[in-house]
């Protein structure tokens, strides 16, 4: 058997071997199955029921330490200030009646205006300007022993109020016209803007003060004060 014959006989087997190697080379290697991903974590929702916030307790209203039925409501305050001996105008009077209100907590409030009148016989005296002087009243009730009193303060609307007075006489040489600012400085001098009075029907108090001493001679005359309270 020659070489050619051997090649011819071996050809089918060689061909199969070659094909086997080719197929093996082309067949992809079997890989391990992919590992499954762990499931995503699930959020756990917890529902909690909270109790409602506490309701704020109402602030108690301060209870006065006295019977408000005795003093609460409307009052009428009468004020009269009479000045004698002021240079050029001998008799100057300031007066008014003011409505006051006392509330359930004992607070006192009101407002008014003092009217001015002049007396100068035998001459005639007139208020030419600034006849009404406005003010407010504030204060509070308090107990003093068995009595209930009011602590009151007058506050001028304008502490620099001015007024024009004129005196007319038969003897024209006695005629006089002047611009003055008397009332509030006079009351400040004698501490008359603050006072206390019993909170009872027809309560009253009166004082008479010489102005020259307390004002170091700046003011002149005598001031008579009369305060009355009515229900």
Image (cartoon, helix red, strand yellow):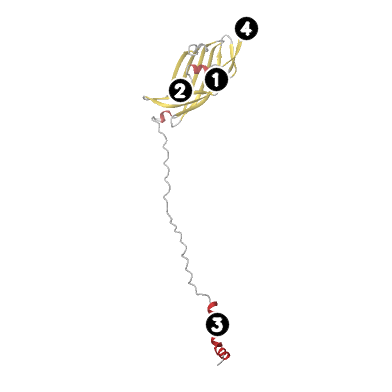
Task: Quote the CA–CA distance across marks 3 and 1.
Answer: 139 Å
First along the sequence among labels 4 and 3: 3
| Residue found at the far bottom of this picture | 1
Q: The N terminus lies in which quarter of the figure?
A: bottom right
Label at residue 229? 2
Residue at which label 3 appears: 18
Residue at which label 4 appears: 173
**Which element is circle 4 on?**
helix
Task: Quote the CA–CA distance across marks 2 and 3.
Answer: 137 Å
Q: The C terminus lies in which quarter of the figure?
A: top left
**Which element is circle 1 on?**
strand
First along the sequence among labels 2 and 3: 3
Looking at the rendered image, the disc whose residue lies closer to the viewer, 2 or 3, is: 3
First along the sequence among labels 3 and 1: 3
Label at residue 115? 1
Q: Is residue 13 left or right of residue 68?
A: right
| Residue found at the far left of this picture | 145
Q: Give the residue at x 46% y 14%.
A: 208
First along the sequence among labels 4 and 1: 1
Task: Give the x, y percent position of residue 148.
Answer: 40, 25
Quick check: 17 above or below 103?
A: below
Task: Give the x, y percent position of residue 42.
Answer: 46, 61
Q: Give the residue at x 55% y 20%.
A: 115
């Amino acid at each position: 058997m020659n070489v050619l014959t051997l090649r011819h006989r071996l050809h089918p087997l060689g061909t199969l071997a070659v094909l086997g190697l080719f197929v093996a080379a082309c067949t992809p290697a079997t890989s391990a199955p992919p590992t499954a991903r762990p499931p995503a974590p699930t959020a756990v929702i917890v529902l909690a029921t909270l109790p409602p916030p506490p309701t704020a307790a109402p602030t108690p209203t301060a209870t006065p330490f006295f019977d408000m039925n005795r003093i609460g409501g409307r009052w009428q305050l009468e004020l009269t200030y009479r000045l004698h001996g002021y240079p050029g105008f001998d008799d100057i009077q300031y007066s008014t009646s003011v409505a006051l209100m006392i509330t359930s907590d004992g607070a006192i409030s009101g407002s008014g205006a003092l009217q001015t009148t002049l007396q100068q016989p035998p001459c005639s005296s007139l208020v030419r300007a600034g006849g009404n002087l406005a003010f407010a009243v504030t204060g509070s009730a308090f107990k003093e022993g068995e009595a209930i009193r009011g602590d009151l303060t007058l506050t001028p609307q304008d502490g620099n109020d001015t007024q024009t007075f004129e005196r007319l006489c038969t003897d024209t040489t006695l005629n006089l016209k002047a611009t003055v600012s008397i009332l509030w400085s006079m009351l400040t001098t004698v501490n008359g803007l603050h006072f206390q009075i019993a909170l009872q029907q027809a309560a009253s108090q009166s004082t008479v003060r010489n102005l020259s001493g307390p004002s170091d001679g700046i003011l002149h005359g005598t001031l008579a004060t009369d305060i009355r309270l009515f229900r």
